[in-house]
Amino acid sequence: GPPPARISARLAALRDGRIDFTTFSNPDVALMLSRDANIEVLPQQTTNYYRMDVNAKSEASAFYDKKVRQAFNLALDRDAINNLVFAGSTTVDYPVPAAFGKAACQNTPTYALSRDERLAKAKALLAEAGVTAPEITIMATSADPVYGRIAQVAQQSVAEAGFKADIVQPPMAEYLDKVFTKGEFDVSLSWLAGYTDPTMVIAWWNPNFAIWNRASQVDVPELDAALNEVKSLPEGEVRDAKLVEICDMIDDGANLLALVSRTDYIAYRSDKIEVKAAKRSGSSNTYQYIYDFKSLD
């Protein structure tokens, strides 16, 4: 997301009429603009979602042990992230984005079990791994204040399972170097683009295809094969069954975690322009109906 200074500049431009419309991903902006009589804010559900990259390849990290990764995934409270960071304006999300209306990932333990059941299972997994209080660091780049707030909620929720989490907020350049080049991190926050089909975003779980996550993502040949196969299947029951199989493997690896969907907010001058927007959009497709926008002048 853009730094606060650029957000302030766009807010000012919208308020004084230099621009007619813009978008934000920060829910605070929608609240700030709700007091302006001539400005409307349209929330738009997207196939994009906030994510956590969990480092499964560094022997220096507690997450080198798959059981610790699974425990962390179970201990995350995605409902709390939605409620505390986004004031309930987003939705809990899955590797196959919720906006596609697929139930593929919803029956995995991470999502189907109650909060109490997930915490109990997380504690049992940590006991099996022989680390009941793993020390980890959550990396949340300072480039977007939303990441720091997600990290704080995550820190509190995983503590209930026994994790001792610190938060670091490096500038973007350091974050990019440590996460994608050196693989020197435990868990980091970012977001994924969901694009226009359920098979597209999950392709990133094959590091040989993705490349960008090779420093932290474990290659699972069975998952690679399923991801290649699902791309060639037509829409229908067979593809839906393959998506469920893929979700189970993704949940088992607990290596890249979906958190909550990333809502886009279209803010516009309702006294100057009439806006048409889809109820949901794929990545970077917020203005797909821009040719239908009408000037009121």
Image (spheres, rainbow, N blue to C red):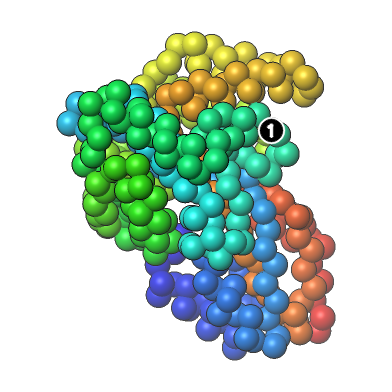
Examine the image and state in which quarter residue 55 appears.
Answer: top left
Along the line of sight, which residue is nearer the eye, 201 or 109? 109
Where is 282 relative to 250, above or below? below
Where is 207 relative to 294, above or below? above
The residue carrying mark 1 is 103
Q: Position of residue 49 (x, y in %)?
A: 54, 46
Examine the image and state in which quarter residue 255 appears.
Answer: top left
- The answer to whether residue 150 is seen in the rendering is yes
Along the line of sight, which residue is nearer the eye, 34 or 68? 68
Name the residue at 43% across, 61% down.
Answer: 146
85 sits to left or right of 132: right
34 sits to left or right of 4: right
Q: Position of residue 69 (x, y in %)?
A: 35, 31
Most distant residue in the left direction: 60
42 sits to left or right of 109: right
Q: Position of residue 40 (x, y in %)?
A: 70, 76
Where is 52 relative to 28, above or below? above
Along the line of sight, which residue is nearer the eye, 14 or 128? 128
Q: Residues within 10 Å of mark 1 (few under 14, many from 20)?
A: some
**Which residue type does callout 1 highlight?**
Ala
Q: Quadrant of the N terminus?
A: bottom left
Name the residue at 40% across, 56% down.
Answer: 153
Name the residue at 68% across, 58% down.
Answer: 44
Name the residue at 51% across, 20% down.
Answer: 249
